[in-house]
Image (cartoon, helix red, strand yellow):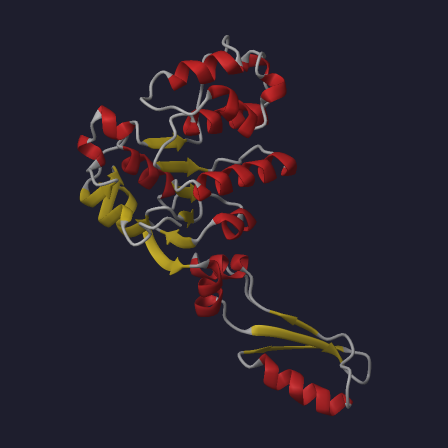
Amino acid sequence: MTAHANELAVDVRGLRKRYGDVTAVDGLDLGIRQGEVFGLLGPNGAGKSTTVEILQGNRSRDGGEVSVLGADPATGTRAWRSRVGIVRQDESAPAELTVRETVRHFARYYPRPRDPEEVIGLVGLEARKNSRIKALSGGQRRRLDVALGVIGDPELLLLDEPTTGFDPAARRQFWDLIRLLADEGTTILLTTHYLEEAETLADRLAVVAKGRVVAEGAPDELRRRHGGEVTVSWTAADDSPRTEHTATPTRIVAELTRRFDGEIPGLTVARPTLEDVYLRLTGQEAPR
């Protein structure tokens, strides 16, 4: 994070948005510090994409207060918009242009863009820079979407499911790009269904369900607060598997050590994962 980490790049209070009879965002509060990578998690329909669109100024809100880089997105100026980059789920670029032509064209929209050739390399499209967009694969088009999101060298980058369609190698390369941007001081808001991605990249996370933030904190903090019990498994003296769910795994292991007078056969201690926490907080946890 930057030296301004205590200042909020995004400050949202009581955000509300309805579509007819459907409430997409229902009193959402959110604070994102300058220079941090912030992950927004939630099931489909939780209000994540609507929130991102409101933060960018591309969708109106029905209530609440929103400040993004010190301005209300609803009245953001052209200069303000140039400070915010976005990668949406449904980007599209002119199919007949090449990758290089497209990135260079979008660079002209910004007062201080990054070097187009550098950006093409950062997203892994160097080998396809002279290819027309219509000839790219789905994953390569998604890489281009990311390039167009970062070409303006934004202070705030909004990423809405950015690695959908990426193969594992492309996803890892994208992670490297996010780390680079974060090291440079860019504030990043990331929505993703890939929990490994969120845990790897985000300084803090918010879990959204039914249009509200139900938990917020660093990944380790969320696991401690909302993970529930630890699972201790071992093999009993009769060779049958045993499992116990407990909030005091050290005590269980100590008791088993005394019982077996040393090594405990088949011992595993499984602490709740971020996925366990996410499923619990969003009401999708499977019964034991």
The spot of residue 219 in percent (x, y) is 47, 59
The spot of residue 10 in percent (x, y) is 28, 45
Number of labels in the image equals 0
Residue depicted at x 47% and y 20%: 116
The spot of residue 209 in percent (x, y) is 38, 52
Picture layout, residue 182 above or below residue 227: above
Closer-to-camera residue (74/114): 114
Residue that sits furthest to the right in the current view: 238
Which quadrant holds the C terminus? Answer: bottom right
Residue depicted at x 55% and y 40%: 176
Picture layout, residue 106 above or below residue 25: above
Residue depicted at x 59% and y 21%: 126
Kindly indicate the quadrant of the structure image that contains residue 261.
Answer: bottom right
The spot of residue 46 in percent (x, y) is 38, 46
Is 5 displayed left or right of 274 in the figure?
Answer: left
Closer-to-camera residue (226/211): 226
Kindly indicate the quadrant of the structure image that contains residue 124.
Answer: top right
